[in-house]
Image: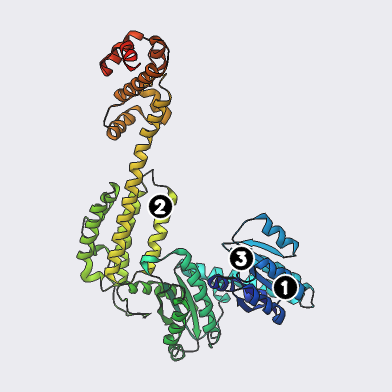
Amino acid sequence: MLKILIADDEQKVGWLIEQTIQWSELKAECVGVMSNGVDALRAVKELRPDIVITDIRMPDMDGLSLVRQGKEACPECVFVVISGYAQFDYAHTAIRYGVADFLLKPIDAKELNDVLRRIAEEQYKKTNLHEQYVQEQCAAKEREQKARIIVRNLIKDSELSQGTRECMPARYPNGVWRCAAIRVEQDPQNCSAEAETFLYSRLYGVVQSLFDQMAFAHLALCDTGYLLLILNGPDEAEMERIAWKKIHSVMLEEVRGFGGTQTVIALSGMALSADALCALAQEAKGLLRERLVEPETWLIEPTGRKRPDAVPLLGKTELAHMENATAVLDAAACREILERTFSFAAGTASKDGAAACAMAEMLFDRYLKSISKMTFISEEERRADQDQWDLLLRNVTGFETLRSVMTQFLTDRLAYYRKKKEQMDSRPVLLAKNWIEAHTEQPCTLQEVSDHVRISPTYLSTVFKEETGVNFKDYVTEVKMARARSLLTNGDEKINAVAQMVGYQDVKYFSRLFEKIVGLKPAQYRKLMR
């Protein structure tokens, strides 16, 4: 078995690398995670690992020094360098020292495992285990492919095919099946997708380790926002003896050090056939919604009670009102609608997580429907809103918290989009003003300027008056006369030349207009200013 050593001054990053590596597939083990170069070099000398994965910037001894001295102490050791800096001198030095690869942060799991897989194959070629390693790699890929098929069917709530059922690892094919959906939660006021990914990478390893020690065939698979655990035992009594309290305690201890606030386990019912796994998986996933109304509960099991439909929980016109408020980007109206809707539904939804979740999702769908019609909101922004809302919903516990978090999120987004629209509405005006000031020698007609800023003359005229308080024609005249005053004061051009330089071919018309606005004829103004 290959020995891999990890060195990174950020402990969380080191652990993340450890969780990212596909150990069983590589037939490798982690012999240590070091936080500085000195300890890592000592481990290289004592443990003589096959592969060392090291960051460049570390205290006491940097990664490049570790590579150089590590190669001297253990020539057969292969080094992989990870850096947050895409700088040629780092890469050049690392290659000169004989590193196998140079990877950039943030670490891409597939890229890292591809590199390690290549190195492992090269290492095994040096031994008589190469053929066995290749065979095991093929078997691992086949198992991984089968696992993807299984989870895809389970998550899509479709039926498992006969072939897929035969792929299911079952120590007790005639025993009992059960699914558990496991979620790690963050503070909804301070949650992020990046932190969630890291927390689940930690949780996944813990769950797998816990159930490897039990007498149940299992398959733990990650989905967005929860882990799906499939259990197979000899009978219901044995399944009931699983110590969920102890499992929860171990999981919670693991994630609390990384910003997790709680781990939740939702258990499905039991079935005597793998044919029921789709229904069991959906049942377990659905039960996670009960955290919306049971914030103190970490173990959720089926109750058998009938769940109310979400539609009657909403007032007859509340969904339409929500859509209308969003359409005009009215954050205050949105807040009022949400307060009224949550108050109306509190009697029922505050006691049923599925109903509360459905109600919130229906309101959010109306918000999303409205902003999808707004051309100034990009597809990336809409997708980000959806992703952030999904993240918040996964981390909210309690009906009142749901009310507060949803109200804050939607009103903040509407305020942001209103400000963006105002800025975008003013942009054509700014472009028009800049163009006019740069082209005073031209007529600067409404059609000419609107063509430049690529909007219709009618719309430009309207937003120009709204933004500046003066109509378009008066503004053009004002700019031209300001330019004329400057030329008359600082230049020696004749009056007819000044007229042409500010876009008037008829000098008499220019003189009359100048006198009307300034109160003096051009010649009088020049004499006065000099």
Residue matched to label 3: 57
Front-most of residues 204 and 99:
99
Write the residue at 30% across / 58% down.
363
Instruction: Where is residue 344? Give x, y as percent.
Output: 20, 64
Which of the two discs, 1 and 2, labels the residue nearer the N terminus?
Answer: 1
Instruction: Where is residue 214? Give x, y as percent.
Output: 53, 87
Residue mark closest to the camera, 3 vs 2:
3
Placement of the N terminus among the 4 image quadrants: bottom right
Residue matched to label 2: 382
Q: How crowded is mark 1: few (under 14 residues within 10 Å), some or many (20 or more)?
A: many
Which of the two discs, 3 and 2, labels the residue nearer the N terminus?
Answer: 3
Image quadrant in which you'd find residue 303: bottom left
Image quadrant in which you'd find residue 6: bottom right
| Up/down of 260 relative to 115, above or below | below
**Residue type, mark 3 in image:** Arg
Q: Note whether residue 74 is visible.
A: no
Q: How crowded is mark 2: few (under 14 residues within 10 Å), some or many (20 or more)?
A: some
What colour scheme has been applied to the protein in the rendered image? rainbow
Front-most of residues 296 and 530:
530
Q: Give the side of residue 259 with respect to residue 134, left or right.
A: left
Residue matched to label 1: 70
